[in-house]
Amino acid sequence: MRGFIGGLVIGLVIGVVLAVTAPGSNTPARNGQSAAALTKGQIGKPVSWQLASAYPSEMPFSGSLGPTMIDRLKKISNGNITIDFHEPGALVPALDLFEAVASGTVDTALASSQFWGSKSPAFELFGSVPFGPDIASYLAWFRQHDGQKLYEDLYRRHNIHAMVCGVTGAAGAGWFEHAINEVKDLKELKIAASGLASRVYKHLGATTVQLAPADLQNALKMKKVDAVAFSTPAADQYLGLTEFSKHYYFPGWFQQAGFIDLMINLEKWNDLSKNQKKMVETACMANMEYSLAAGEAGQFEALKNIVIRGVDVKKFPPKLTKALKRAWLSIARSRAASDKDFRRVLKSLRKFREDYSIWQELGKI
């Protein structure tokens, strides 16, 4: 975790230095070079991109990451990097963003890798991990162990350069039309869920469907699904899930922490100068700090509002949670046996968590 914080500080310092030395600042050009020459030679040619987001811009935390990053990039680059933000579905459907970025149809996009399990099962382990790590240990594994290399290699095979550009904390277990007391209550339900959450609920007898975030409310309203398992209380409340489902369950068994990815077409990324790449990385690192702090701070208020609206908020019975965990372990074994990338990522994460648990037991109160 110390390495992550150190990297964040260094990234922010780089952003400030680049902004100060950009044209229009008070720093004089060196050796008689004009500010324009410095811009061209050191910062790089001006960049103008289109960004498509899987999250509505007004969605708390996740949705605001795109506009926040764009504004920060424009400032630290002194206008050298400009990006136009597009709401979900404005350029391409949210669940088609992977192909759109890979092909260059869209320059860059914000989404979760849990949507891309059909491309490689291993992607789902970077979206959220059932019964997985909290955000501190997830980031520690990602930054200081094998996580980031495995993640970048996986995306690059598909002509995409990706970086984590936001984080989310614990999700709810899901919104249900009827009370859920045991495994049989899940059978024959149609649940909107993504990634490994979808696979576990399906393993226990439910039918699952993957929908874009912006489509979840309408699916509940039109009774196309019986339940939704999506994200944190603040995000779920924004989507209006309280209006059409009155049972909200915890714990966040399928997500204690999650990443939001900035996907960039690989050719577009390679065309950037070294300094421009640092600027993009800096903006994303600042987004991570913002989403970590603001996201955790905002959940209780959202949860309070959900209760005020008459939603029944409670935990799954222990037997059901144990059944979910057994289902996850079965799925993990099966997918690790059949896919080498899933096996490699899962093995790396488990090894880190085993070692980290010793430190947690000794050092944490």
Image (spheres, rainbow, N blue to C red):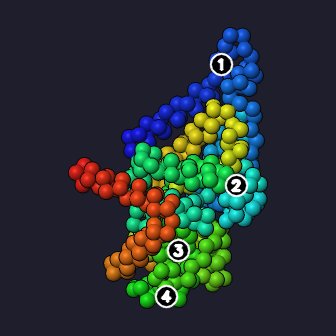
The answer to whether residue 234 is above or below residue 270 is below
Other-residue count near label 1 (Cα within 10 Å), few / some / many at <14 / 14–19 / ≥20 = few
Q: Give the residue type that dot 4 points to.
A: Lys
The percent coordinates of residue 152 (x first, y second) are 56, 49
State which mark lies toward you, 3 or 2.
Answer: 2
- Between 338 and 203, the one lying in front of the other is 338
Q: Which residue is mark 2?
A: 102
The percent coordinates of residue 189 (x first, y second) are 53, 86
Q: Are marks 3 and 2 in contact (CB under 8 Å)?
A: no
The answer to whether residue 122 is above or below residue 175 is above
Q: Secondary structure at mark 4?
A: loop
The percent coordinates of residue 365 (x first, y second) are 24, 53
Give the mark, 1 or 4, whose residue is nearer the N terminus.
Answer: 1
Q: Which residue is mark 3?
A: 198
Q: Which residue is mark 1?
A: 26
Task: Determine the CA span between mark 1 and mark 4.
Answer: 66 Å
Residue pictured at 64% horizontal, 68% vertical:
212
Other-residue count near label 3 (Cα within 10 Å), few / some / many at <14 / 14–19 / ≥20 = some
Q: Report whether residue 360 is seen.
A: no
Q: Give the residue type that dot 3 points to.
A: Ser
- Between 83 and 324, the one lying in front of the other is 324
Other-residue count near label 4 (Cα within 10 Å), few / some / many at <14 / 14–19 / ≥20 = some
Other-residue count near label 2 (Cα within 10 Å), few / some / many at <14 / 14–19 / ≥20 = many
Give the mark, 4 or 3, whose residue is nearer the N terminus.
Answer: 4
Give the mark, 1 or 3, whose residue is nearer the N terminus.
Answer: 1
Q: Secondary structure at mark 3?
A: helix
Residue 1 as seen in the image, left or right of residue 163 = left
Q: Which residue is mark 4?
A: 187
Residue pictured at 37% horizontal, 76% vertical:
326
Task: Determine the CA span between mark 3 and mark 2.
Answer: 25 Å
Q: Give the residue type that dot 2 points to.
A: Ala
